[in-house]
Image (cartoon, rainbow, N blue to C red):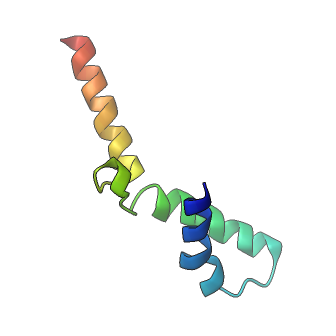
Amino acid sequence: MESFFSRLKVELVYAENYRTVEEARSGIVEYIEIFYNRKRRHSTIGYVSPHDYEQKFEQLSVSTIRG
């Protein structure tokens, strides 16, 4: 978690100048849901995004169940 919050601050919070709490909240949600989970590659899961990793896992699970 410390690594995640460090990246969040460096890649987003310090680079922006939010005028309201709602603006900050919206920017953080977008960062997490659009960039961090869907686009940003993570070394611990083979340099793919969490979204792609989960899709591959689901495909493998379904094909394993169906035999």
Q: Nearer the viewer, residue 4 or 15?
A: 4
Residue 1 locus on image (x, y percent)? 60, 54
Q: How many marks?
A: 0
Figure check: 29 above or below 11 = above
Figure check: 20 above or below 34 = below
Q: Is residue 15 left or right of residue 55?
A: right
Q: Quadrant of the C terminus?
A: top left
Q: Nearer the viewer, residue 34 or 36?
A: 36
Residue at 60% across, 86% down: 15
Name the quadrant containing residue 49. Answer: bottom left
Residue 21 locus on image (x, y percent)? 81, 72
Q: Is residue 65 left or right of residue 17?
A: left
Residue 26 locus on image (x, y percent)? 68, 67
Identity of the residue furthest to the left in this view: 67
Q: Is residue 41 left or right of residue 35?
A: left
Figure check: 40 above or below 23 = above
Residue at 59% across, 69% down: 6
Residue at 23% across, 17% down: 64
Identity of the residue furthest to the right in this view: 20
Name the quadrant containing residue 55. Answer: top left
Residue at 22% across, 12% down: 66
